Image (spheres, rainbow, N blue to C red):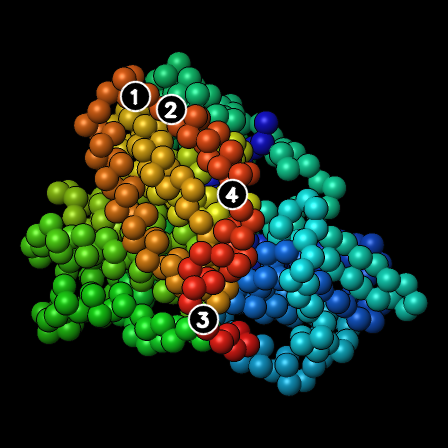
Amino acid sequence: MEVISVFDMLKIGIGPSSSHTLGPWRAMQRWLRELDAEVGLGVVDAVQVDLFGSLALTGRGHCTDQAVCLALLGHDPETVPVDQLSSIIATLRGEQRLRLGGTREIPFDPASAVRFHEAEQLPQHPNGMRCTARVGARSMASTYFSVGGGFVLREGEEMHAPDRQPPPYPCQTAADLRQHCELQGLTIAAMVWANEETWAPRGDVERRLDAIWHVMLQNIHDGCHRDGVLPGGLDLRRRAASICRTLVPDESVVAPQAKGNVKAWIEEIRGRSFGFREVMKWISCFALAVNEENAALGRVVTAPTNGAAGVIPAVLMYEVCFAEDPVPPAAVRAFLAVAAEIGSLFKKGATISAALGGCQAEVGVSAAMAAAALVEMRGGSVAQALMAAEIAMEHHLGMTCDPVAGLVQVPCIERNSMGAVKAINAAELALASDPDRAKVSLDQVIRTMGEVARDMSQKYKETSQGGLATNISVQLPEC
């Protein structure tokens, strides 16, 4: 049984893609560690990285080559200064040299050392990459696969090999989860807490969840106050900030202290009265804000992927801003814990990789995660939470991944706003229903999603070879 932590599903990284940016970044870091352990980085004369399948087809738009370069330069996605990414890459392209692992300086021209093999796919997974080091006359190669959500496997590794102590409540299916909770009288969040405390003290878990929510909040706030055009060549203009201004046009006059202060900004929103249409705009605004930050190579949280990073923050922010009573930090942590657990069921039973399953595996899974978490936050039962996740995914089945020009922008950004609205609607339907009378279970939907993923044409799986991507002509400059 695969053992997955909350922090496997919710990871802090750099946009625009968890499978095409964060995953390759982590793969390169792992390769460097393994190479250093085997021969030492100080004896390496040159390195080469070859990208295959979906990594090659949409890698330029997803900035996979930049992720590779940043990893080779020794940067980490959780700490690299995002406002310096362009200058770091520009310097490398100009100097064409890097200090590998902070030790030996070697020649490295990104234009020739990172190669895109659009017509070739490795058999284990569409997101394949081969890393090669030259040590004297010897060539040493390792192959890795970015399997979605920032997860990475080396060639030959099993997909479901546990790598940590088994928790008290292991869950491979939704039926397992429901059984544990009902037998022990636990909420989903309480069950997750018990599992997480197997691997870390409760205080550490709380601090990490708070850090994740901080990044999400910062994404929303920054995206709601940042104008401009997104990079990549589509000339797509940011919209979250303009929507925000229509909802609080006098923000700078009425609440100057809210500028740059997320807490004060939330209080400003909570202190105003909004109708249904305006609340709907806020939900979309929150989701757009996060994914515009993601498209601009901002630091975001995989939830469960970067392409779907806006759904869970938007739904949680909706509750934070519009619930009758203020939402305490403990409730935020519980929301994130429940969302992550539901996401892990999809990873175990189907996929969270758009290169394998299309956008149903990203925005669809994210909507299911958010819907279940919202139900539990509202006081719904475990069965109702699972029902909400089922409803949300049921109405995302078959959704293609067809990024225009290989960028995580069109239709990805808007899809997050739609996913957030669907998640809230699914939660409301579940809270108003008797799950024991439901005709479809969450496990059945997960199994169906996996079948749809396998049956779906490859061109609709993050290749930019089908759907909207082939009907909108764009000349893509270098990322």
Which residue is the site of mark 4?
A: 456
Instruction: Specify which label sits upstream in the sequence, 1 or 4.
Output: 1
The disc label shown at residue 438, or none: 1
Disc number for residue 441: 2
Q: In which quarter of the image is residue 215?
A: bottom left
In the image, residue 166 sits, relative to residue 24, either above or below, namely above
Locate residue 320, reporting x and y percent.
Answer: 22, 48
Spatial distance from mark 1 to mark 3, Cα to Cα? 44 Å
- Marks 3 & 2, CB-CB < 8 Å contact: no
Please identify, in this view, whether the residue under mark 2 or under mark 4 is nearer the observer: 4
Left or right side of 108 for 473: left
C-beta proximity under 8 Å, tags 2 and 4 = no
N-terminal of the pair, mark 1 or mark 3, is 1
Pick whichever of labels 4 and 3 is earlier in the sequence. 4
| Local crowd size for mark 4, using a 10 Å CA cut-off: few (<14), some (14–19), many (≥20) | some
Occupied quadrant, residue 257: bottom left
